[in-house]
Amino acid sequence: MTVEWRGKPVWIVNRTPEMIERTEALEVDRLADPDSSVPQQPAYIEGYMRSIKPEIGVLVGICTHLGCSPLFKPEPDAEGVGTTNWPGGFFCPCHGSRFDLAGRVFTNVPAPTNLVVPPYRFDSDEIIVVGEDKETA
């Protein structure tokens, strides 16, 4: 699902247990910033899935290279992503940047940082409020 926040697309991604397993098993040396050291997410977003709940991803859908919109390619070994052993994730067709299912950028691609995780909170099990932290609600 795509929603809009501050004029930007925000993806709400339902990640299956198998998608979470593939992301967790990804070799960290394939990622430029596997621990999300560059602050592209609120401080309360921790862990390899970069989300409050591992099964729900919330990411700004804009490549951190030049602002194109990556494609969602969740299936393993998807065609057209410019690499072998693809674990699933996001591929930017403009310049070839690749991100895993948590929005972490792969090494040796033009994008310098992970996809942005906006501030968000769960209002209920069915409602996510983008743009507000739990602490400020």
Image (cartoon, rainbow, N blue to C red):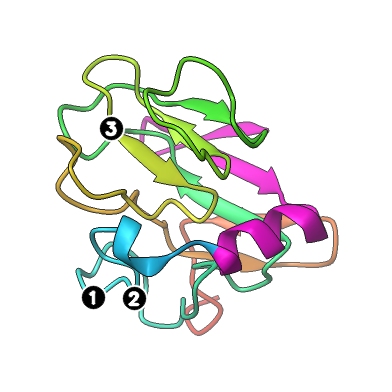
Mark 1 Cα within 10 Å, few/some/many (few <14, many 20+)? few
* Amino acid tagged 1: Ser
Q: Position of residue 34 (x, y in %)?
A: 34, 68
Residue 109 placement: quadrant: top left
Q: CA distance from mark 1 to mark 3?
A: 19 Å
According to the picture, the residue beneath numbered tag 2 turns out to be 35
Residue furthest right in the image: 125
* Above or below, 24 relative to 64: below
* Above or below, 87 relative to 1: below
Disc 3 is placed on an element classified as loop
Q: Position of residue 29 (x, y in %)?
A: 30, 65
Q: Judge left or right: residue 100 versus residue 33.
A: right
Query: Quick check: is 46 in the magenta stretch?
Result: no
Disc 2 is placed on an element classified as loop
Q: Judge left or right: residue 69 versus residue 75.
A: left
| For the residues bearing labels 2 and 1, Cβ distance under 8 angstroms | yes
Query: Quick check: is 8 in the magenta stretch?
Result: yes
Residue 8 placement: quadrant: top left
Q: Judge left or right: residue 100 versus residue 68.
A: right
Residue at the image position 39 percent from the left and 30 percent from the top:
83
Disc 1 is placed on an element classified as loop
Q: CA distance from mark 2 to mark 3?
A: 18 Å
Q: Position of residue 36 (x, y in %)?
A: 31, 71
- In the image, the segment drawn in magenta is 1-25
The answer to whether residue 94 of the structure is visible from this angle is: yes
* Amino acid tagged 2: Asp
According to the picture, the residue beneath numbered tag 1 turns out to be 37
Q: CA distance from mark 2 to mark 1?
A: 6 Å
Q: Which mark is residue 97?
A: 3
